[in-house]
């Protein structure tokens, strides 16, 4: 677990202009082509990605105007990357890749459907890199957040290996709320860990075993947002309760972000790939 007194780095990249890397594909071609454009996440942009004859739709007409960046996030939403990364369009969603990190579509391993997403980060002790897709806006007061992950190999975690990242604040000025990350334990396995930014705490998540390496596993977070002590947060791994917290403040803001993907700092080996599929958010598990 996190050593006492060690602060978790908030390397979300949101406070500065970051590249938005969108990926789409032509089903007739075996290759994936990347088109990269600059986008300020706080204000949104309208990327156009063309692969052969396929174009990600953009909000370019009055009837199809993009919602504002501070719009309400739909209570029920899911994504299995069957439409590539087109569903992560600003301003309510976007994907980022910093440093030498990359993301792409894969046909194997896949949890369901034809495609999953591969997030590859190259880490070092000076800050590492992140590669993630983001949902942002005014989130529901109560919701379940889930995704299927596949980790092909273990690693020694020097500082941070993060899978879920919840932020709060206002567009352009955010701070950490909750992290679901991976840590090494004495049994030699890689285990899920929860970090509470508001209270600077690492609640015990030892009720679940090490994550399965080379197999799909499911992470789910129940998040009841509250600025007072009426908040609640729970984490499940493959349906087994890892953490259950009640009677505390869970979110001191109204606007937020949810990051899904891979952030790695000081891993051995330095390159890590995690695969993600079947992201869900809704009023029930």
Image (cartoon, helix red, strand yellow):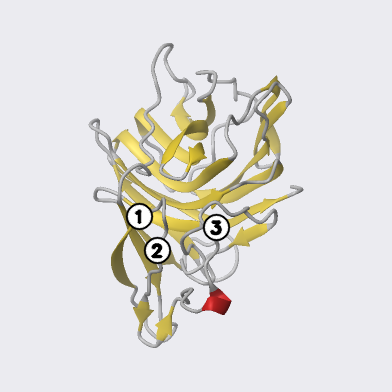
Task: Give me the disc on residue 45.
Answer: 2
Counting from the top left corner in percent of width and height, residue 266 is at 29, 32
Counting from the top left corner in percent of width and height, residue 89 is at 47, 64
**In the rendered image, which residue does mark 3 sit on?**
277
Between discs 1 and 3, the one toward the N terminus: 1
Front tag of 1 and 3: 1
Which of the 4 quarters of the picture holds residue 154?
A: top left
In the image, taking residue 225 as reference, residue 214 lies left or right, namely: left
Residue 92 seen in render: yes
Image position of 158 with respect to 169: above or below: above
Image position of 266 with respect to 52: above or below: above
Between discs 2 and 1, the one toward the N terminus: 1
Secondary structure state at the residue bearing disc 3? strand
Counting from the top left corner in percent of width and height, residue 99 is at 25, 48
Residue at image location 50% in from the left, 37% down from the top? 169
Front tag of 3 and 2: 2
Within 10 Å of the Cα at label 2, are there few (<14), some (14-19), or many (20+) other Cα atoms?
Answer: some
**In the rendered image, which residue does mark 1 sit on?**
40
Which of the 4 quarters of the picture holds residue 173?
A: top left
Secondary structure state at the residue bearing disc 1? loop
Between discs 3 and 2, the one toward the N terminus: 2
Q: Are marks 2 and 1 in contact (CB under 8 Å)?
A: yes
Distance between the Cα atoms at labels 3 and 2? Answer: 25 Å
**130 and 156: which is toward the camera:** 130
In the image, taking residue 33 as reference, residue 219 lies left or right, namely: right
Residue at image location 39% in from the left, 88% down from the top? 53
């Amino acid at each position: 677990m996190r050593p006492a007194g060690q602060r978790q780095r908030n390397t979300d990249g949101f406070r500065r202009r970051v590249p938005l890397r969108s990926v789409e594909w032509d089903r007739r071609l075996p290759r994936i082509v990347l088109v990269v454009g600059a986008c300020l996440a706080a204000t949104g942009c309208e990327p156009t990605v063309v692969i052969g004859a396929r174009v990600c739709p953009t909000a370019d007409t009055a009837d199809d105007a993009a919602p504002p960046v501070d719009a309400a996030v739909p209570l029920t939403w899911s994504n299995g990357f069957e439409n590539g990364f087109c569903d992560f369009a600003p301003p309510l969603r976007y994907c980022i890749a910093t440093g030498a990190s990359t993301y792409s579509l894969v046909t194997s391993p896949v949890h369901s459907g034809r495609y999953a997403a591969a997030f590859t980060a190259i880490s070092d002790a000076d800050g590492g890199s992140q590669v993630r897709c983001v949902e942002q806006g005014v989130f529901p007061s109560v919701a379940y957040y889930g995704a299927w992950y596949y980790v092909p190999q273990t690693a020694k975690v020097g500082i941070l290996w993060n899978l879920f990242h919840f932020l709060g604040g206002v567009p352009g000025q955010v701070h950490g709320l909750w992290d679901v990350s991976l840590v090494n334990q004495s049994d030699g396995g890689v285990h899920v860990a929860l970090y509470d930014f508001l209270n600077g705490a690492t609640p015990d998540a030892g009720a679940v075993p090490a994550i399965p390496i080379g197999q799909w596993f499911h992470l789910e977070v129940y998040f009841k947002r509250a600025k007072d002590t009426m908040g609640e947060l729970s984490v499940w791994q493959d349906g087994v309760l890892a953490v259950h917290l009640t009677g505390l403040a869970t979110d001191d803001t109204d606007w937020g972000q949810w990051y899904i993907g891979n952030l790695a700092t000081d891993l051995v080996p330095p390159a890590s790939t995690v695969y993600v599929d079947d992201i869900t958010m809704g009023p029930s598990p």
